[in-house]
Amino acid sequence: MEEHEKALEQNQLSQRVLKNWGLSSELLRAEIDAANMQIALGKYDEAINTLKDSKRCLEIACGNLDKKETVSPIEVAEAYCEISMLYENMNEFETAISLLKRTLAILEKRPQEQQSEGGVSARTGWLLLLKGEVPQAIPYLENAVEKLKDSFGSRHFGVGYIYNNLGAAYLELDRPQSATQIFAVAKDILDVSLGPHHADSIETCQNLSKVYSAMGSYTLAIEFQQRVIDAWEGHGPSTEELREARHALEELKTKARGTSTNRVPTKALPLPQYSLASRNSQPSIPLTQNSASSIQ
């Protein structure tokens, strides 16, 4: 509790500094962080007021951007994308998706913005997955794959992430054969680009085990689950992930003997951040959104 109080004090100081410098986007992020800390401290009324102030600022910003779209379209697209992420931080997914779609409407008219279009399309699809709107997510993810393959090549890690999310979408729609093929492609890409012991490479292997289990192919499911265990053992003998992987293996063996158990949801990985402001650079991947990365 004391750490939260100190963090809140530091956040309020940061807000004053940012406001003095006129850095509105960073200020809004600080306000949202402050609201989250207020919630953690049980200061719910204060948190609600903080978020209301942030949302009012965002609404005003969107209104101003609408007027500038024909004059500075790329700058407006960048701003829409940034604002959508702020709404996402407030769990306002519907508004975040709407702004990303407005961003895409601008970028689709400009072939030179193909890389940015792919990144925004990927994020739109991922947010739709989080909302449970799986059929609507698939076209955005498929478009993202094509755009980013053209920009970075078919073996880029960002493409692997999108393939993994696409596989999760196919599995949710009860298309296990398609999911298997897509997960296999994702695993090949991430194994090469990140290494087979990277947490996200292991997750794609885990997804393959789950989809084979869903198809009743328990021999293959057990084989891939054992690979998951072997990979997590490289992270140390006492990790929580290793314990969960071993438990999943025992469940698979039980299933293979004819006893049914509940299927664990397949995870969609967090997507890379594709910044419109750095279109000529390789995208980086933040792995800080795991709490929101499962398709339930």
Image (spheres, helix red, strand yellow):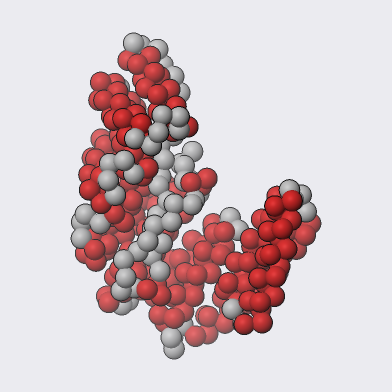
Q: Position of residue 191 (x, y in %)?
A: 25, 45
Q: Residue furthest bottom?
A: 71
Q: Is residue 71 visible?
A: yes
* Residue 167, placed above or below residue 217: below
Residue under the image location 25 percent in, 21 percent down: 219
Q: Is residue 147 left or right of residue 296?
A: left
* Residue 193, placed above or below residue 81: above
Q: Position of residue 257 (x, y in %)?
A: 34, 11
Q: Is residue 228 visible?
A: no
Residue under the image location 32 percent in, 70 percent down: 281
Q: Is residue 172 left or right of residue 62?
A: left
Q: Position of residue 168 (x, y in %)?
A: 36, 42
Q: Using the image as rendered, state which of residue 234 and residue 269 is in the foreground.
A: 234
Where is residue 262, by image quadrant? top left
Q: Using the image as rendered, state which of residue 166 and residue 47 is in the foreground.
A: 47
Residue under the image location 46 percent in, 41 percent down: 295
Residue under the image location 40 percent in, 47 percent down: 269
Where is residue 201, by image quadrant? top left
Q: Position of residue 59 (x, y in %)?
A: 62, 73
Q: Using the image as rendered, state which of residue 14 and residue 116 is in the foreground.
A: 14
How many numbered tags mark residues here?
A: 0
Q: Using the image as rendered, state which of residue 53 and residue 248 is in the foreground.
A: 248
